[in-house]
Image: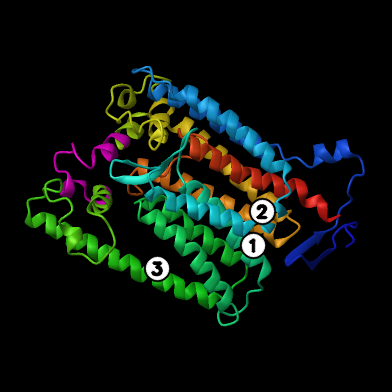
Amino acid sequence: MPLHGTGEVSAQRLDGREVIARGGPVSANPSAAFRAGWDWIGPACMAILAGIGVLFIYSAQHFTGGDFWMKQLLWIAIGGTVYVAIAYTDYHFFYRYAHIIYIVSIVLLLALWSPLGIVREGSRRWLNTPFMSLQPSEPAKIAALVMVSTVLSRERLGTVRESLFALSQIGALVAVPIVLIFLQPDLGSAMVFCPMIFSLLFLSRLSRRFFIVVLGAFLCVLSIIGTDIWRYHEFLKDRGYNAHEVLGEYQKTSWVPLHDYQRNRILGMISPESVDPRGIGVSWNYRQSLSAVATGGPFGKGWTRGEQAQLGYLPRSVAHNDFIFAVTAEETGFVGTSLVVGIFLVLLINNLRLASLARDRFGLLLISGVSVILMMHVFVNAGMTIGLMPITGVPLPFVSYGGSFILSCCTLQGLVQSVYRHRRSFA
């Protein structure tokens, strides 16, 4: 396949993958090829975000002298090693072994219901391993991305009828991890799958009718959930808004598969006085997060001087992970949070640039899926701290504390780097 030229673009099939060839000379100098074949914008953004994370994890626990920031440094070092290893691995390795990666991720999810599973605050989300507490939902996201990208790169999609077999495969593949994650329960992680899958289907040029039908179904589901939340509000109203005392009663009569505490979180965003009139219950984190963001002002109160985290108003169990954005907002203000969001924007735009340089559909889908996963995490995490989203356990990429999550983010970005570096293998 000729790769020299100024503007020629061609496509062919290679091992079931659609290969996109773009013109451009390839250097014969291995050293020059290494330098030219490495994208430095992505790792630079990752390093800056990770550094910011360590600073504000330290700040969030400054008053109590916690050592999570030191553990985070260790996870960043391990994650960096994983990132480099993935970047040096030809991404077609994941194409060839996608089914094995997927099966392993499902086994890890199922293992949560074995003696290895750890129950914390009513949720079964972690596995107790000799080295760390592993959160299987993180490798499940990566496995689903790789598996769906593999299927879509092998199958040509046209009309919904022509694509029915591929769509049925994808539906079955994605339904298993979503259901298992939802049963933990972990609604936040389950939410990330759908935007990622539909973005991949959109890039695969599936018929518009499919997306129209999906949009209609989404609006229908949204209206059903909205009606259920309204009925729950009326249920609480009849019982004097004592959400804590009647927790678990409504879910026994509702056929919508939500727990009452999840309904409380949604109402805590829409109508906090309904579930927590005194502001000391389910809406506490939400109110304190809003207070932290609002009092930060344009330039913040200064590093380690944020009152909400330092005095424990933002609970110390969540300030360094799920609510790290609120800590950053209070201590650096609008300017600091704008910088953090700006770095994420640079990372995502750079990912999309690298996706446009991919030589095959598999690489294009991988990078696009990574971008959507990271974008969803940023949007949901930042949104829940300012009242745009209900409180869910969705951390901020590279900034929030967490070993499994850091390794997951580094693996995802390693796939991006791998696609970029090994695009020359088509020469």
**Viewport quadrant of the N terminus:** bottom right
Name the amino acid type tagged 2.
Answer: Phe
Q: Is residue 222 above or below residue 64?
A: below
| Residue farthest along the bottom direction in this orientation | 161
- Label 3–label 1 contact, CB within 8 A: no
Horizontal side, residue 91 vs residue 202: left or right: right
Q: On the image, numbered disc 1 is attached to which residue? A: 150
The span from disc 3 to disc 1 (Cα, nearest Å) is 26 Å
Residue 298 appearing in the image = no
Which one is closest to the eye, mark 2 or mark 3? Answer: 2
Looking at the image, which residue is at 62% across and 70% down? 205
What span is colored magenta in the figure? 269-289
Horizontal side, residue 376 vs residue 326: left or right: right
Name the amino acid type tagged 3.
Answer: Phe
Which one is closest to the eye, mark 3 or mark 1? Answer: 1
Q: Position of residue 22 (x, y in %)?
A: 81, 58
